[in-house]
Image (cartoon, rainbow, N blue to C red):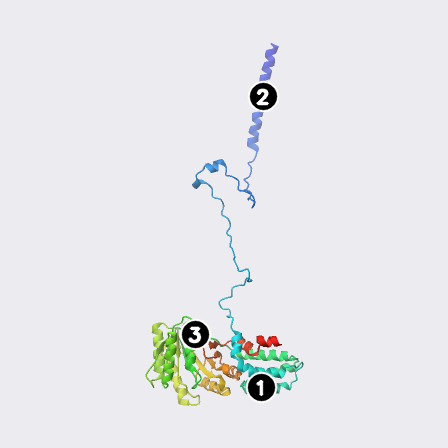
Amino acid sequence: MTTVAIIVALVVAAVIVLFLARGRGAAQLQGTPPRPLEAPRPARANEEAAPAPEAERAKPASARQAPPPKPAVIEVTADESKPLQAAAPPSAKPRRDVAGLRKGLAATRGGFIARLTALFQGKKEIDPAILEQVEEVMLSSDVGPKTTQAILGRLREALERNELRDADAVWAALRAEATRILGIGGGAIRMSAKPSVVLMVGVNGVGKTTTIGKLATRYTTAGKKVVLAAGDTFRAAAVQQLEVWGKRVGAEVVRGKEGADPGAVAFDATTKAKESGADLVLVDTAGRLHTKVPLMDEIKKVRKTIAKALDGAPHETLLVLDATTGQNALTQAAMFKDALDLTGIVLTKLDGTAKGGIVLGICDELRVPVRYIGLGERAEDLREFDAEDFVEALFGKGEEESAAA
């Protein structure tokens, strides 16, 4: 009896313990919150990727989860021998050949600038009396009396304020005045319409036809379609010369009979340019003395005729001047300006004269910008005018001068 009781007690105890154990496990399953999902730790550069779990490998390739995309990496390659530079904006001024411009102005530098330099050579202090010598040099270099007095007036004021204590200060002041005077505009033809019509005027022998040929070369090389109007109908050689340029650069030349109305030729050229989709029309005209009223009236009629062919034309009227004529060029410019609405000046033969100071007089007195300057016989020797480059080439020191200093 006692043995049976003990066995029963042990069985009951075992059942109780088993029951309690099951209850505790259920409580844990119900009360424990689920573990949050953790982002996988990114592998380090020197770690191998962990093998995929068996279940994942068992899935077909199309059903597997694609790995997250890697961020895009932009690679920048550069020539290590050159520093990185920001790209210039489209409107940035292109770098110009100042050394070549200085070479072309050698005659003017050897006269006008060399004489000014000699005045200040070795002077530690500036005597106001030296301005009289400066005046003489400027007048003899065809700067012109009005412009010369304006520049000297500013220099005297600066001397009175004790701002020009040495030669370097005076030289800097002269450069600043030249930049101010020349900075009224200038540069290439303004292509404001299609076609843009440019009327070229001037006296005999200044180089109008040659200038037109050089401009045609420049613009056809740049991919523009150019039409040339042989409006100098009184000189057969001028028409032939223009036809030679036309064949050379692939530009159409519109001509009339000898002695034909130049206005009619200009009209026909403008009309053909419109019909053919040309970009530029360059109209040559006969040389005419600025003192001959009938001839000046004739050029006015040519302008009106061009306007009938194309509203708003001519878009530019350029006066071609020979720099070697000095003050006479300034007189011509003044009279042509009175008769016509000049938009610019082309100054030829500047490489063959020491009278380059005429540029200052034209810009200061007439307020007409210089568009181009001629520094030689080649087509590329016709250069767009830039005031800062011109002043630097004229007043600045070249490499040889800098080395000597």
* Location of residue 161 in the rendering, given as x and y in whole percent from the top left corner: 65, 80
**Mark 2 against mark 1, which lies toward the viewer?**
1
Q: Nearer the viewer, residue 18 or 79?
A: 79
Give residue 7's quadrant in the image. Answer: top right
Q: Residue 16 carries which label?
A: 2
| Whole-number angstrom distance, CA of label 3 to CA of label 2 | 111 Å
Q: How many marks?
A: 3
The reply to whether residue 53 is in sight is yes
The residue wearing badge 1 is 137
Amino acid identity at mark 3 = Arg
Q: Crowding near pointer 3: few (<14 within 10 Å), some, many (20+)?
A: some
* Location of residue 120 in the rendering, given as x and y in whole percent from the top left corner: 63, 82
Above or below, 14 relative to 231: above
Label 3 vs 2, first from the N-terminus = 2
Give residue 391's quadrant in the image. Answer: bottom right
Q: Nearer the viewer, residue 295 or 122?
A: 122
Extreme residue toward the top, this view: 1
As helix, strand or loop, the secondary structure at mark 3 comes to helix
Q: Crowding near pointer 1: few (<14 within 10 Å), some, many (20+)?
A: many
The residue wearing badge 3 is 218
* Location of residue 25 in the rendering, given as x and y in whole percent from the top left corner: 56, 28
Q: Crowding near pointer 2: few (<14 within 10 Å), some, many (20+)?
A: few
Describe residue 8's horizontal placement relative to residue 382 as left or right.
right
Label 1 vs 3, first from the N-terminus = 1
Amino acid identity at mark 2 = Ile
Amino acid identity at mark 1 = Val
Label 2 vs 1, first from the N-terminus = 2
The structure residue drawn at horizontal position 42% and vertical position 72%, both measured from the top left corner, is 221
The quadrant the C terminus occupies is bottom right
* Location of residue 169 in the rendering, given as x and y in whole percent from the top left corner: 63, 78
